[in-house]
Image: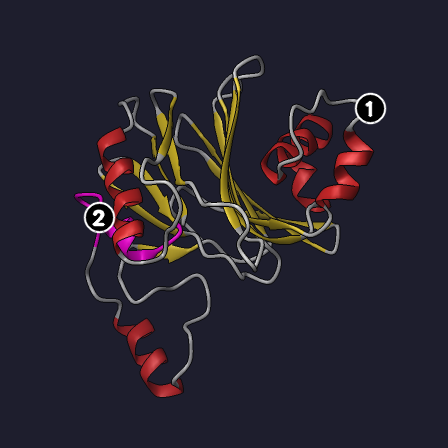
Amino acid sequence: MGIAGEVSVRGAWADTASVDRMIQAMDASGDAGGPADPGICDWGWVAVGHRPTETGEQSGVTAQSMLDERLGWCLMFDGRLDNGTNLHAELSECFPFRSGSDAEVVLAAYHRWGEHFVDHLQGVFALALVDAPREKVLLARDRQGTRLLYLGTAAGRLRFASTLPGLLAADGTETSADRTALEHELDHRRMVPAPPSNLGGVTLLPPATLRVLEARGRARDRGFHDGEAVPRLGGVGRS
């Protein structure tokens, strides 16, 4: 299971076929489950998708999507909210819920708090939220970094996926070895901390980070921890 997407920053169209390949690769690697058909949301300059997951998993972690055509928002959510019930109750007076899904709770939180919505989320998750009217995409990862979100660039496009095989399934993503990261992993025999990965050009979105990508190529990071935001600056593809 997982999420994937592509954001074009040079005025071109996002490649939905690349997004589909990333999603299919996550399934082939054994990291996905549920229905065979992925869901893809295409806004032209950005395309995002997810591998739907059957409900009822013991962990409660699922991949969900939610589209609000009225507001022009699309969310791909991989994870679980621990405070979803409380947020649903808090936000029900100002947001017309149609379901009780975690994905819709996240959209309601964005509706209420804007980019500060991540400050209110508790749980394990990685997400991609498209705000089409404002021409921006928001990527976020939980505070503990339990759920992964790999980032890569190729020909004026930013790509992201929940798994490394998924990200590399899209043609043109940089795959040169990152010697520093490889030596770190071999010397210390442990996971390489974010943002490096073992491949040059590929990074992990750091935990407790909201990355805002704009259609014109601008990017900015905002850290969040225990409800306190710490601003970070960054460009597209930078962690």
The structure residue drawn at horizontal position 37% and vertical position 40%, both measured from the top left corner, is 35
The answer to whether 95 is drawn above or below residue 163 in the figure is above
> Which quadrant of the structure image shows residue 17?
top left
Name the residue tied to disc 1: 93
Label 1 sits on a secondary structure element that is loop
Q: What residue type is labelled 1?
A: Glu
Considering the whole magenta stretch, tell me its main secondary structure: loop
Give the colour scheme shown: secondary structure
Image-based side of 22 in relation to 61, left or right: left
The residue at the far front in this view is 56
Dot 2: element:
loop
Q: Residue furthest top?
A: 70
Q: Is residue 170 magenta?
A: yes
Direction from residue 157 to residue 139 in the image, left or right: right
Q: Which contiguous range is marked in magenta?
A: 162-174
Q: Which amino acid does label 2 sit on?
A: Ala
Rendering quarter of residue 144: bottom right
Can residue 15 be seen in the rendering of this structure?
no
The residue singled out by tag 2 in the image is 169
Q: Specify whether residue 150 is painted magenta.
A: no
Where residue 40 appears, x then y in whole percent? 36, 30
Of tags 1 and 2, the one toward the viewer is 1
Identify the image quadrant of residue 58. bottom right
Q: Where is residue 108 in the image (x, y as percent from the top left)?
A: 68, 29
Towards the viewer: 104 or 116? 104
Q: Residue at x 52, y 46 (%)?
A: 55
Rendered location of residue 213, percent (x, y): 46, 35
Q: Which mark is residue 117?
A: none
